[in-house]
Image (cartoon, rainbow, N blue to C red):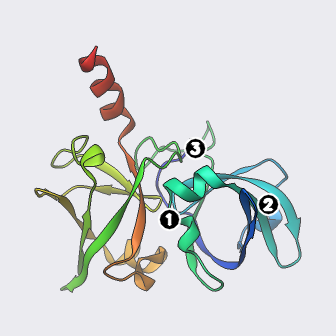
Amino acid sequence: MFTGLVESTGTVVSLESRGDQARLIVSIPFQAELALGDSVAINGCCLTVAELLPEGTVFDVLMQTLKVTSLGDLGTGSEVNLERAMLATARFGGHFVQGHVDATGTIVALEPHGQDHRFEVALPPEIHRLCIDKGSACIDGISLTIAELKETSAVFWITPHTYAHTHLHTAAAGQRVNLEADLLAKYVERLVKR
């Protein structure tokens, strides 16, 4: 379980295809505090630490994960959002984030407006129907509040802190991003369908 409050960013060392899976190595600022088996959300996707090397932290990425996330788009030098699994004793900011990516969306716009940034993301129908104005959504591991729900997209306002301390300062229109719909919305939808 995560909160969607990005702890820091890291840099992709390599992403190597290995048949039905891939091996991802990321340079992580808090690697010294990690142990084998720990969970780390990388751009909102929960992965397990498989190995700790001098050059970075190793994660095994399944083919299914590559199919439903944007992790396969990463290359050497890509900046990624990082968050360790939440502690039961920690203050809970953000919202409930599982690290289970539901789908990918595409950045429509990321434009400066005064000190803030207007961030618009195109949402597939299966995610859009779970969203509401002022509701929560997780975009590449960032817990964001939907400022405006449009017909096929959502608009978010990004504060200077979030822009500077996540990978958003390197993001651009047309880029794919990982989406995780609000957990409560998913449960409500399932209960209502029954």
Q: Which is nearer the N-term, disc 1 or disc 2?
A: 2
Q: Is residue 49 above or below residue 80?
A: above
Q: Is residue 166 shown above or below 34?
A: below
For numbered disc 2, what is the local secondary structure? helix
Q: Residues within 10 Å of mark 1 (few under 14, many from 20)?
A: many
Q: Residue at x 27, y 66 (%)?
A: 121
Q: Secondary structure at mark 3?
A: loop
Q: Are marks 1 and 2 in contact (CB under 8 Å)?
A: no
**Label 1 close to label 3 by CB (< 8 Å):** no
Q: Is 190 in front, or is 82? A: 190
Under mark 2, the amino acid is Glu
Q: How many marks?
A: 3
How far separated are the C-alphas under marks 1 and 2?
A: 26 Å
Q: Position of residue 68 (x, y in %)?
A: 50, 54
The span from disc 2 to disc 3 (Cα, nearest Å) is 17 Å
Q: Give the residue type that dot 3 points to.
A: Ala
Residue located beneath label 3 in the image: 90
**N-term-proximal mark, 1 vs 3:** 1
Q: Quadrant of residue 9?
A: bottom right
Give the residue at x 45% y 62%: 140
Q: Earlier in the sequence, mark 2 or mark 3?
A: 2
Q: Is 50 on the left or on the right of 2, as rendered?
A: right
Residue 154: image x %, image y %? 20, 60
186 up-or-down from 39: above or below: above
**Residue underneath mark 2:** 33
- Circle 1 — which element? loop
The residue at the point 46 percent across, 54 percent down is 4
Query: What distance separates the C-alpha of mark 1 from that of mark 3?
Result: 29 Å
Circle 1 residue: 70
